[in-house]
Image: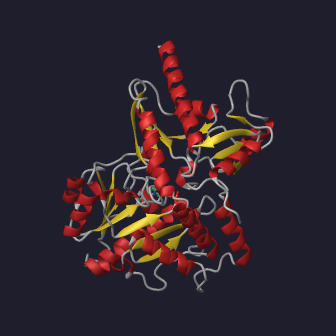
Amino acid sequence: MATRTSDDLRADAARAPGTDIGRDPVSQPLSDAALDLIGREKTFGARNYDPLPVVLARGQGSWLADVDGHRYLDLMSAYSAVSFGHANPRIVGALVAQAQQLGVTSRAYYNDELPLLLERLAQLTGLDRALPANGGAEAVETAMKAARKWGHKIKGIPEGRAEIIGCQGNFHGRTIAVIGLSTEPQYRDGFGPFPPGLSTIPYGDADALERAITPRTAAFLVEPIQGEGGIVVPPEGYLARSLEICRKHRVLMICDEIQTGLGRTGRFLASEYDGVKPDGVILGKALGGGLLPVSAFVATHDVMQVFHPGDHGSTFGGNPLASAVAMASLDVLFEERLIERSASLGEWMLGELQDLRGGVVKDVRGRGLFLGIEVDERYTTARPVVDRLLARGILSKDTHDTVVRIAPPLNIPRDDLAWAIGEIRTVFRELERDLKRAA
Ligand SMILES: *Cc1c(COP(=O)(O)O)cnc(C)c1O
């Protein structure tokens, strides 16, 4: 299949019939078709989400269209799962070709795709072995199981006593063990009891890590940049110092790079900023090329040796279809130089947005195309900003009440990003004007 450039993708989106950018909620109320779909979801679905009022039906590159043909620029990328754009032609091509060849085999047999992905993941991370899974939380659970077993069998912690230290404000997923480590009251409320042996320390504070380590500590689990926590960038050298402390006390350092990995922050892994190679890395989201859930725990031989046949597994983990899609995603990432692109576009966008600071905007921060605009809670939450951006045709998402998350596909055309920066400026100007009027 011929490789299409981002400009081609944008041209395709522009050719879509009957489209206009954004939807003004007053003059363009939701259509009956959209309301019908929203009604069905609210009636028949568990209400564990509160989506923005847009019903998406098509995606191409960095652009999405709703059921009524309104277009939106995607600055969210499904929480970085769509880092290579919607319907990326190379990744879709790999998906279709592999689906026609062989989809799912289970790990009862070898297949001719998974070995290549495992080798690739080991080489790219500089680690030894990978264990494939599907969703992110599942790979985090895998890492936690590996860490505990390593603690008991290799480090010599008494059986059943291994401890894992995480950070306050973390997000590692939604399973019971994982939320056992969460410090977000809503994520935990009513879901206990949680597994023992889990504790948290302040993020960005390496001394707190050293104080928290006990002879029973097996691992320190950390995000190189806290994503859901509000795009929190730790002090320079934090991971390097943490790794030093972990080494000194024979504790594993495991980096959750599910969101920060695969070029999102302008490096292949965000932990590269501190020049560290942790004992284990967790990948997910973008690894599935925006098409499938694909995740992996990648670690040293020292850690992975704890797994013997039958110790752990997943029916779908490492299936040929997922493996082919993951490899095509990595090909796109490297061959289209998207890591460098994330670094340069991100630096430019951060510079452009930083002069918004003052007034409603308290801080603008991030690395690569992983940016957060924090509003001052004295004036507003992030949600009105997100709503106004939606009306103007930009999809973003509030996180932690006061932060607007900006994480577009890494191959977003620069012109589209420039347009979005202008719209973001306008939204903040209008918001400040309206807040002044209301005061
Ligand atoms: C999204 C995310 C997860 C969980 O991934 P799921 O695929 O939603 O289970 C874990 N860790 C981090 C850092 C994430 O951003």
Query: Which colouring convention does the figure follow?
Result: secondary structure
**Does 366 sit above or below residue 279?**
above
Give the percent coordinates (x, y) of residue 112: 61, 82
Q: Nearer the viewer, residue 84 or 143?
A: 84
Residue lying at 34% horizontally and 56% vertically, measured from the top left = 273
Q: Residue 96, position in %: x, y?
A: 72, 68
Residue for point 70% across, 63% down: 2
For residue 140, side relative to residue 386 (left or right):
left
Is residue 337 visible in the rendered image? The answer is yes
Which image quarter: residue 269?
A: bottom left
- As displayed, is residue 352 above or below residue 411? above
Residue 109 located left or right of residue 2: left
Q: Answer above or below: position of 63 versus 275.
A: above
Is residue 131 shown left or right of residue 2?
Answer: left
Above-or-below relation of 22 to 215: above
The x and y percentages for residue 240 are 26, 59
Q: Which residue is more in the foreground, 112 or 379?
A: 112
Residue 402 visible in the current orientation: no
Residue at point 62% right, 76% down?
Answer: 320
Find residue 293 and report its horizontal and vertical position in percent: 58, 63
Callout count: 0
Quadrant that contains the N terminus: bottom right
